[in-house]
Amino acid sequence: MISSAHTDIPVRTWIDHWSPAWARPYLRLMRLDRPIGWWLLLLPGWWSIVLASFGTPRLMPMALFLVGAIVMRGAGCTYNDIVDRDIDVRVARTATRPLPSGQVSLKRAWIFLGVQLLIGLAILAQFNRFAMGVGAASLVLIAVYPFMKRITYWPQAWLGLTFNWGALLGWAAVRGSLDRQAFLLYAAGFFWTLGYDTIYAHQDREDDALAGIKSSARALGRHTRPVLAVFYGLTTALLAAAIGPPIYNPVALVPLALAAFHLGWQVKTLDVASPDNCLRRFKSNRDFGLLILAACWAAWR
């Protein structure tokens, strides 16, 4: 049973104004009206591309990553909704999504997923062979992720492994190899995701308990803020280690310090009992990611 009227479907967005009626459920299935998801998927890849390019962004791989992040985030959301359709109907925030609400049939959702994956494959094929192999390896993580909330209280950890794969792929796309800095960026992104997705999961804590869904928010409860401080502290330390070696311009320390301050603000002001508070802090992570991107660029100036 739906326990509240809260929903994650925005009302009267650009989708309603600018897209044909037949396309609207599919665009919502991709969460195309909620860009924070593809921003969080994109930014670790952009960090990696800029660092691997010695601070001179390569526009073609960055553009391909942008399109790829939008498409693959859409594919991930589509696949997740296919797997979770019976659960989503029992959670207030997700009950009005296209699949549980019946706006898109299961068969058409599978077809739409296939189309998105083909587009993602076409984008991946633009990179070198090593990068193609790195990118293809992420499909295992993507395939397993929707099931993790059924077997562990830490599906956010699996999401961290999945959502930050771009840190490895970006480096591979530029250098044709992987090295220490790429893995440091990946590890930093892992703890960053553990933090922000725990915040996000607090919106559903009560409904998840009723539906039998596990999450780090349920596992941590009132201990979320101190543990979040640890996650974000590790994020900052690992990013400093990744960005630090090439810093010739101390100006790079400014966006890095601002980013650390931003994470501290999230921890200090978080109210896990307020869904609106959690959502605002979750969405603010785009700003954190952009500050880190600025630090990666400035490190080589």
Image: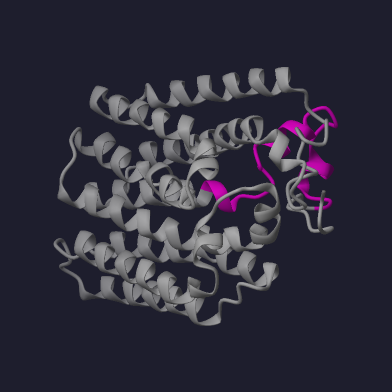
Query: Does the segment drawn in magenta span residue 35?
Result: yes
Does the image show residue 291? yes
| Depicted 244 relative to depicted 124: above or below | below
Is residue 204 or residue 73 the one in the foreground? 204
Q: How many marks?
A: 0
Residue at x-position 33% and y-position 64%: 235
Which residue is rendered at x = 31% and y = 58% of the image?
Answer: 188
Residue at the far bottom in the pictured view = 268
Q: In this view of the protein, which residue sits in the foreground, 75 or 216?
A: 216
Magenta segment: does it hold 154?
no
Image quarter in which the C terminus is found: bottom left
Residue 63 screen position, x and y as percent: 44, 39
Write the start and end of the magenta stretch as one range. 11-38
Left or right: residue 51 compared with residue 143: left
Residue 257 screen position, x and y as percent = 33, 77
Q: Is residue 53 visible?
A: no
Nearer to me, 262 or 94: 94
Residue that appears at 69% across and 69% down: 276
**Quadrant of the rendered image containing residue 179:** top left
Could you say where residue 135 lies in the image, as x and y percent from the top left?
35, 30
Q: Residue at x 82, y 36 (%)?
A: 101
